[in-house]
Amino acid sequence: MKKVIPQPKTPRKKGSASTGSPFPKKGSPVTVVFTLRGDDSDPEYKISMINRDCPRKKAISIKSSLRWIDTFKTPNGGLNVPFIDDLGRFTGTTLYKWSCDPRSIITTVVSTIAKRLVRYAIRHNKFRIVKKHYKSIVGAACYYAFTKDSHFWDRVLFFTRNLEKRGNLIHRLRLFFSSKWSDCKRFVISQVIFQTHWLLSRGKCPRDKLQFYEGIKNTIWRKPESAPPRTMLTNVVREIAYAISSI
């Protein structure tokens, strides 16, 4: 009877296929992933310009509609679109250049961060529990996008790991921090949060902004005429957009 001598397994090289070959099979799909390793092996990344009406782009969730808030149109020479990592954090790197309205970059960055946080939450919680806290998640993403407060975001990530127990703390924490803002800035964040389902969906346009005054309660903005002046809102939106764009 022949005795079979087992052969030692050859270690697989990093990035190799399941056959042990360092090269992918012919015809196999190749996915290009934007990574940051921080060493000499990083390829040189050339920042490209996004068209004003671009519907989608890799690594960001484009929300270019201007219907979510009523401000004046303000031209700009191109804003930096920041690269957001898998945990929804700013990396300090510019991903694209975008000659867009300041309102578009605000909603695009907030939507990108919120979707990263939703994805992280689904890994640690049941989907029905995550869906229940959509509004709190968007509110936290909005505050972080406006301030880039890493301490705040670390606490949000900790709360997100157990939404059933700590989900309400995300909303309370965001309220505590944003309560110190001016009326104009709080009005802007309330308008963004009101568009929760649009920011987390694939819809091109949000709901009619006039419904904001019908659906919002227990605030000083119960009627359109009670909202801050349009000029002041335009200035605040520009300040927020340029703060987000600054790397």
Image: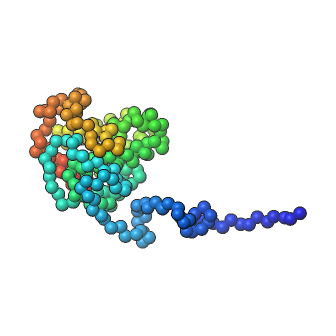
Q: Residue 237: x percent and y percent? A: 19, 47
Q: Residue 40: x percent and y percent? A: 42, 71
Q: Quadrant of the C terminus?
A: bottom left
| Residue 47 figure quarter | bottom left
Q: Quadrant of the N terminus?
A: bottom right
| Residue 130 figure quarter | top left
Report the number of discs. Answer: 0
Residue at 48 percent across and 37 percent down: it is 126
- Kindly give the residue lying farthest to the front in the view shown: 27
Q: Residue 64: x percent and y percent? A: 26, 49
30 relative to 13 in the view: left or right = left
Residue at 35 percent across and 67 percent down: it is 45
Residue at 17 percent across and 32 percent down: it is 221
Nearer-the-camera pick, 95 or 166: 95
128 relative to 97 in the view: left or right = right
Q: Is residue 95 above or below residue 136?
A: below
Is residue 150 something that shows in the picture?
A: no
- Kindly give the residue lying farthest to the bottom in the view shown: 40
| Residue 159 figure quarter | top left
Q: How is the image coloured?
A: rainbow
238 relative to 88 in the view: left or right = left
Q: Is residue 19 above or below residue 196?
A: below
131 relative to 192 in the view: left or right = right
Q: Residue 193: x percent and y percent? A: 28, 39
Is residue 115 something that shows in the picture?
A: yes
Residue at 20 percent across and 31 percent down: it is 213
